[in-house]
Every structure is written in C-alpha cells, then in structure tokens.
Image (cartoon, helix red, strand yellow):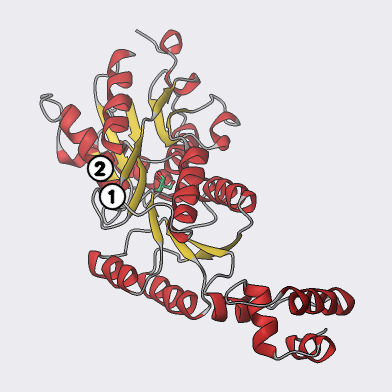
Amino acid sequence: MATIRDVAKLAGVSVATVSRVINKNGYVNKETEQAVQQAIKMLNYEPNKVARGLASKKTETIALIMPDISNPFFSELARAVEDVARLYGYTVLICNSDNDSGKEQTYINVLKKRYVDGILFATHSLKAADISAMNEAGIPLVLLDRAPSKASCYVVRSKNYEGATLAVRHLLEIGCKKIAHIYGPQETATGKERLLGYEDSVRHFEWFTPSLMVPGHFRINGGMEAVEHLLARHPDVDGIFAGNDLMALGALKKLQQMGLSVPNQVALCGFDGIELTVITEPELTTISQPIYDMGALSTRLLIQKIEGVAVDNQIYEFDVELIARGSTRKDMKTP
Ligand code: RIB
C-alpha cells in the first residue's frame, strides 16, 4: 500500500507539498501539482481518510448515534441517513447506545478523536450542556426524533402529542368506551409527549384513572406484560393506544393469547408506522411518522452545517398520519 512518503519521493517533492495537493489547501504550482497527481496515479495511492481528516478536519464521515438498532423504527431511520449521506459523498458510522448515557458519552469522545465531520443524535440523554460543549468544540450536530423541543442546534422530530390525540380520537370514534395507554420510557421526549397527549384527551371522562396508563418500555415484551397488568385491573378496557408499534404488536399477541378478539373486544392502535404492522392479523392501526423523511432531512441539515452552508438552529416538526387498519376497523366491532 503506497504511502504519502512514496508519492513525495516519486514526485521529487516534500510530504507537505503532497498533502497540500491532496487537501487543496495552500499554493502549489501547476508543474508540481501535475508531478504529484502523476505519482499518485502510478502508485495507486489512496489518501488515509483519518490522516486526511487531521490535515483538513474533513473525513467525509458522519456518525448516527441511536438507542436501539434492533427496533425497526431506527433501522428505517438509518436507511434514510445512509441513502442521503452517500448522495453527498459521506460515509455513516452507526452507533448503538442501548439508551445508555455512559455509552453515548464514550461514543462522543471516540468520535471527537476520529474527526468525524458531524454527529446525528437520535437519543435522549444529551443535555443542554453537552450540546453547548459540542458546539464550542466545533462539532456539527443535529438532534432527531427524541430531541427536546428546544435546543441550541437543529432539531428534527414529529408531532408526538398531536399523534397521541389522533389515536385516542380514532378509538373514541369507533365506539371504544374505556381506553388505556401503554407508554414508552418517560425520560424520552417521544414517550413523554405521547403519554401527555393521551392523558389530556381522556382526563375528563368519568372512567379515567391513572392505572389505565402502564409502561411498556417501547418493547414487544413490554407490550405483552402491560396488557396482562391492564386487563387484570380493568377487564372492561375496550381500546388500547400503545406509544409505539413494537408495544402494540406485543399487546396484540397477548390479547389473542388471552382469547380476546381484536378489534371486536379490544381495539388497538400503535405509533410509528413500521413495516411490521401489516403482517399481523388483523393488520395494526398506527400513527405513522415520516421516518424516512426525518432521517433524510436531518442528514441534509447536518451536511449543510458541516459545509458551512447552514448556520441557524431550527426545529422541524413533521406531521403524523393515522393509518386505520383491521385492529380498529369500525365494521368489525360488535355494537
Ligand atoms: O419505536 C421507538 C420509538 O422511539 C419511536 O416511537 C421513536 O419515535 C423513538 O422515540
């Protein structure tokens, strides 16, 4: 593997001159530049991206830190990030933090040393102080999905609160008389805002009680356990809004294991719009987030920041959409 020294020797110039030609930073006369390009070609020299990054502070690499890559929401998000990054000539480092703020901090420290050009955070543990520190360190970043509703950087999210009210309204419209909520982790903006949207939509009903809200940890087994707890306390629940699709899928599984018909006895609505919602029977009604668009926009914003094109910090909130399917179909519910 030819090195920058081999190129310098063959071209009869210094390593610093070769570096200036590669990184296009500093004056080199035409003859010298041609000699260096000729030597690069002859030796089939590949500039080391990390070394290049040290010189020009650009490695054409961005990092995406996500909490749970096994959740299809995040893999669909990563798909969009990679598609758009590639369009602009950037490579993506995917980092899975398991919702662990210690792991996130480790990633940030390593990424700073690796000179990635920018970081996309789809996590919740970044504090305002962390964001300020990264801004001061000159590390472009964009927060997406679980971002706080205000931050000193670009934020891309969807309308979680409104989506929750949409889900509850839909369950009421199909005739549900007592609606429960399986909520996601309350340390996440998404889990918290969806729970609030549910609570504000049902608080005034005489049947409402806080024990109708149970945790599901955004996981399939969390949805299964939540249904068991819910129906033990409230066997008359006939509608469930789950704060994400994985918990809704778990809830569907448990309801059917308990011999209950969905939607005839219990109607069910999820949140995200992942592809898995169409392979169940009945298919799952959900509040769909524009996952691909969220990933694509956050990547474009980050690259604009890296390339000095965009400097302001805006919040982009996407609308969400009710996708009504068999798990809430009106005509299937017994009167
Ligand atoms: O399913 C994972 C959940 O965590 C999604 O609803 C997404 O919004 C993220 O916050």
Per the rendering, the mark at residue 157 is none
Residue 75 pos. (x, y %): 56, 50
Q: Is residue 166 above or below residue 231?
A: above
Q: Secondary structure at mark 2?
A: helix
Relative side of 219 to 79, left or right:
left
Residue 81 pos. (x, y %): 55, 50
Q: Residue at x 43, y 53 (%)?
A: 309
Gap between marks 1 and 2, in whole Å?
6 Å
Q: 236 or 67, which is in the foreground? A: 67
Is ligand 1 less than 8 Å from the beta carbon at label 1?
A: yes
Q: 327 or 308, which is in the foreground? A: 308
Q: Can you say which quadrant of the picture contains the N terminus?
A: bottom right
Q: Secondary structure at mark 1?
A: helix
Relative side of 139 to 179, left or right:
right
Q: Residue at x 55, y 75 (%)?
A: 56
Amino acid at the residue labelled 2: Glu
Q: Residue at x 84, y 79 (%)?
A: 39
**Residue 67 can be seen, yes or no:** no
Q: Quadrant of residue 213?
A: top left
Q: Is residue 185 above or below residue 176?
A: below
Residue 217 pos. (x, y %): 37, 52
Is ligand 1 less than 8 Å from the beta carbon at label 2?
A: no
Per the rendering, the mark at residue 189 is 1
Characterize the local packing of mark 1: few (<14), some (14-19) or many (20 or more) Cα atoms within 10 angstroms: many
Q: Residue at x 52, y 37 (%)?
A: 274
**Residue 90 can be seen, yes or no:** yes
Q: Can you say which quadrant of the picture contains the C terminus?
A: top left
Q: 174 or 299, which is in the foreground? A: 299
How many numbered marks have been drawn onto this rendered protein structure? Answer: 2
Q: Are marks 1 and 2 in contact (CB under 8 Å)?
A: yes
User: Pointer 2: what residue?
Assistant: 193
Amino acid at the residue labelled 1: Ala
